[in-house]
Image (spheres, rainbow, N blue to C red):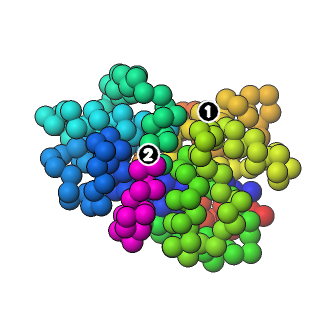
């Protein structure tokens, strides 16, 4: 069985996350990236790969707004980002809820504009649409409502119960435990564009006995060193063609 991350693996939501993070950080309700003054959006998008829990997107955006002189073509190092992330006094849960609430207000104001900020990754998305006879599961830190809306909008017929999301602060480790309990399976493959997420799952599920095959997507929000790091940790790096072949050979 193959489990899929959502943002950065199935759908490119980089523009939406940048705009929602800006709105959350400033209390605005802009509906277009072009409305953001200056260069914080470009700086944020350059460093999006650092963000693991979506609440940290507010922290990163606040830093981008406060650092207009920073070279937006150079990503932050891990050490620099760690300093930024640890400098926020608001709780991660509060920041995550603020992202979800801000996104909800955006959708309520102009759902079509919100949807237009997303684009599914091809050819993977079309391949999933064709495989309507197979159960597949999405494991994401994104909120459930937004994930389901995007699946429906772009023509992917997935049962709402097959989306395991980050609502109520639920982590991917906790959701993976629920998935394994529900399906009664030990060996699954999971593809994500975050090495951090893969490492957390590896530590939880593969220490005594390997239960998860962890794969890094080479598209999406990957950092400049992520492919090398993943390979050093033993996580295969897949492109979309590799993943489609794996889907064809899996049951």
Q: Secondary structure at mark 2?
A: helix
Left or right position of 114 against 33: right
- Report the quarter where the N terminus lies: bottom right
Q: Position of residue 40 (x, y in %)?
A: 22, 43
User: Is residue 103 inside the magenta stretch?
Assistant: yes
Q: Position of residue 222 (x, y in %)?
A: 43, 45
Q: Nearer the viewer, residue 168 or 226?
A: 168
Determine the residue positioned at 49% across, 42% down: 97
- Report the quarter where the C terminus lies: bottom right
- Which class describes the residues within 10 Å of circle 2: few (<14), some (14-19), or many (20+)? many
Q: Position of residue 153 (x, y in %)?
A: 51, 73
- Which class describes the residues within 10 Å of circle 1: few (<14), some (14-19), or many (20+)? few
Q: Secondary structure at mark 1?
A: helix
Determine the residue positioned at 36% across, 22% down: 87
Magenta span: 101-117
Left or right position of 232 against 1: left
Give whichever of discs 1 and 2 has the lower sequence position.
2
Q: Position of residue 185 (x, y in %)?
A: 83, 49
Q: Main secondary structure of the magenta part?
A: helix
Left or right position of 239 against 33: right
Q: Nearer the viewer, mark 1 or mark 2?
A: 2
Q: Which residue has dot 1 on it? A: 200
**Which numbered tag is attached to residue 105?**
none
Q: Which residue has dot 2 on it? A: 99
């Amino acid at each position: 069985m193959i489990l899929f991350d959502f943002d950065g693996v199935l759908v490119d939501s980089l523009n939406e996350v940048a705009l929602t993070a800006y709105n959350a950080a400033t209390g605005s309700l802009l509906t277009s990236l072009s409305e953001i003054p200056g260069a914080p959006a470009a700086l944020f998008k350059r460093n999006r790969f650092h963000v693991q829990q979506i609440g940290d997107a507010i922290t990163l955006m606040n830093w981008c707004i406060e650092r207009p002189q920073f070279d937006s073509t150079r990503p932050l190092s891990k050490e620099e980002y760690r300093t930024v992330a640890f400098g926020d006094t608001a709780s991660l849960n509060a920041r995550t809820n603020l992202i979800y609430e801000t996104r909800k207000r955006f959708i309520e104001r102009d759902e079509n504009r919100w949807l237009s900020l997303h684009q599914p990754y091809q050819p993977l998305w079309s391949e999933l649409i064709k495989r309507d006879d197979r159960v597949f599961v999405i494991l994401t830190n994104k909120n459930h409502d937004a994930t389901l809306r995007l699946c429906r909008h772009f023509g992917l017929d997935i049962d709402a119960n097959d989306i395991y999301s980050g609502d109520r602060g639920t982590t991917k480790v906790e959701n993976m435990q629920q998935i394994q309990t529900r399906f009664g399976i030990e060996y699954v493959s999971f593809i994500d564009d975050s090495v951090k997420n893969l490492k957390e799952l590896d530590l939880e599920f593969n220490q005594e006995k390997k239960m998860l095959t962890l794969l890094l997507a080479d598209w999406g929000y990957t950092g400049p060193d992520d492919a090398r790091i993943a390979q050093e940790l033993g996580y295969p790096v897949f492109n979309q063609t590799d993943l489609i072949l794996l889907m064809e050979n899996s049951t």
